[in-house]
Image (spheres, grey):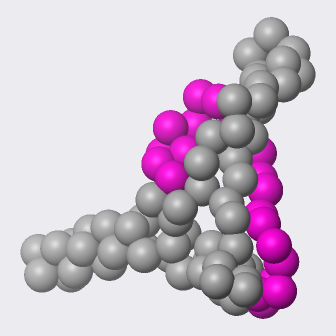
Amino acid sequence: MNDIMIWKAHTMNLLKKCLPESIMEMVENYHCDAKFRELDCPEDLSMNRRCYEKAGYKLTGEKNFIYENLSLVYYRKESRVGL
């Protein structure tokens, strides 16, 4: 029983680390001819923001206040097309 719980915990940790990166890569490859990519993210979702930054997205400095508990920050990533 303990082996199953350890395996489950290990699998969940792998999914948390690998799945977002794989999805970002799939989306970027699907739109491989784009000159740049932009996205927005709630400012307080630090886990998402770290994932985007790890994937090479840079904060633009733009911020949009939606309502009291929600502000969006914007990211941009230049493409390697033509490099």
Residue drawn at point x = 78 percent, y = 66 percent: 36
Percent across and percent down for residue 75 are 69, 47
x and y, in percent, of residue 5 in the image: 21, 73
Camera-nearest residue between 50 and 45: 50
Front one among 72 and 5: 72
Residue in the picture at 52% in, 65% down: 55
- Tell me which corner region of the image, top left, top right, bottom left or bottom right, holds residue 17: bottom left
Is 68 magenta? The answer is no
Quarter holding the C terminus?
bottom right
Q: Residue at x 63, y 40 (%)?
A: 59
Q: Is residue 45 above or below residue 36?
A: above
Q: Residue furthest left?
A: 2
Residue at figure coordinates x 54%, y 81% from the top left? 22
The number of numbered discs placed on residues in the rendered structure image is 0
Residue lying farthest to the front in this orientation: 83
Magenta range: 30-53
Residue 80, image x, y percentages: 65, 79
Task: Assign the N terminus to one quadrant of the image.
Answer: bottom left
Q: Determine whether, in the image, residue 1 is placed left or right of residue 81.
A: left
Report which quarter residue 65 is drawn in. Answer: top right
Which one is nearer the viewer's eye here, 57 or 65? 57
Q: Quadrant of residue 3?
A: bottom left
Is 35 magenta? The answer is: yes
